[in-house]
Amino acid sequence: MKKILITGADGFIGSHLAEKLAKKKNFKVFALVQYNSFGSNGWLENIDLKIRRKINIVSGDIRDKKFVNTLTRNKDIICHLAALISIPYSYYSPYAYVDTNINGTLNLLESSLENNVKKFIHTSTSEVYGSAQFTPIDEKHPINAQSPYAATKVAADQLVNSYRDTFGLNTITLRPFNTFGPRQSERAIIPSIINQAMINDKNIKLGNIDTKRDFTFINDTINAFERAIKTGKKIDNVINVGTNYSITIKSLAKIIFKILGKNLKILKENRRVRPIKGEVDHLKASNLLAKKKLLWKPNFNGEKGLKKALIITINWYKNNKNFYNNHFYF
């Protein structure tokens, strides 16, 4: 039985990954959640109790080198998802992003070497590419961080690459493109549109609605992680995880309105708009390397796949309104 440590397991993607792996008989799952005085395990608390009991939940902080070294002992695989991710917040608290996203990753890499971890799966972000210079974006596309958040993720990615090349650590870096689905923070664009549309009858407030994104459903992203975990091949690559289909935020909102049976106007709110040079205009993934190296492809792709995934997501938010404090976000 392989022992797998998931950092950031209390978050959106991490909780889904922990849930899926806990259902497998050949994995023993250790889930790191951010220590807090409330004793909350984040989105792990949304998992069925029978499954949650199979998960070994540990509270701590990846910024604590001593703690991380102890945590990574006797682990076969590390799936590193812990990070500060809000782009707007990174404009105001860049030091916090450096401390968590860079130093936290360094602690995990050092400890993985010392404790002979067999495989280190790192989570990147499509934001490291910046505005697309060509589409679809493959892994050779130039890196151009346009926010402090993206800059810290670039640094973390390069640290992972350096530990692969210099010390021979077995690494795979997955680079998801705009993952969405149940449990995602309402600060993200799709949950924001859904929840505003559910409680308003006239309009919703958004930022730039002309940008285009490649939205990847959470089930597909988790499948990519599972394939990275299970592969016996030494990948040593950065791999995009996206659908190769992009859509404007305006068109996305209209699809959501139609599913909800609403006829709403979109109002532009300046506080939701990124700085001019910080705006990423277009992201659309090439997933050819994922197909080749991981034998992965999205099950929810194209316009039909996006609509199907949005219906699943919308139904989840309808049934879980108690998790969100609408007036805080809107």
Image (tube, helix red, strand yellow):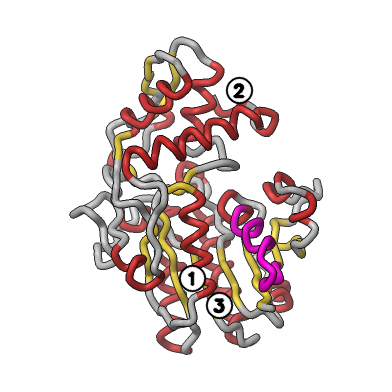
Identify the residue at horizontal 34%, vertical 56% (top origin): 145
Do labels 2 and 3 touch, CB within 8 Å?
no
The residue to which callout 2 is attached is 327
Q: Position of residue 153 (x, y in %)?
A: 44, 61
The residue to which callout 3 is attached is 109
Q: Position of residue 307 (x, y in %)?
A: 40, 35
The circle drawn on residue 129 is none
In the rendered image of this protein, does residue 316 appear above or below residue 158? above
Pick the front one: 268 or 282: 282
Q: Position of residue 329 (x, y in %)?
A: 56, 29
Amino acid type, residue under disc 3 in the picture: Leu
Tell me the crowding category of disc 2: few under 14, some 14 to 19, or many 20 or more residues within 10 angstroms, Cα based. few
Pick the front one: 216 or 324: 216
Q: Position of residue 67 (x, y in %)?
A: 73, 72
Do labels 1 and 3 touch, CB within 8 Å?
no
Q: Where are the magenta residues, as a range? A: 16-29
Q: Residue furthest left?
A: 134
Q: How much space separates mark 2 and mark 3, taking CA atoms? A: 40 Å
- The first of marks 1 and 3 along the sequence is 3
The residue to which callout 1 is attached is 228
- The first of marks 2 and 3 along the sequence is 3
Q: How much space separates mark 1 and mark 3, taking CA atoms? A: 18 Å
Tell me the crowding category of disc 1: few under 14, some 14 to 19, or many 20 or more residues within 10 angstroms, Cα based. many
- The first of marks 2 and 1 along the sequence is 1
Identify the residue at horizontal 29%, vertical 51% (top origin): 244
Tell me the crowding category of disc 3: few under 14, some 14 to 19, or many 20 or more residues within 10 angstroms, Cα based. many
Q: Secondary structure at mark 1?
A: helix
In the rendered image of this protein, does residue 123 appear above or below residue 301? below
Amino acid type, residue under disc 1 in the picture: Ala
Identify the residue at horizontal 72%, vertical 74% (top origin): 71
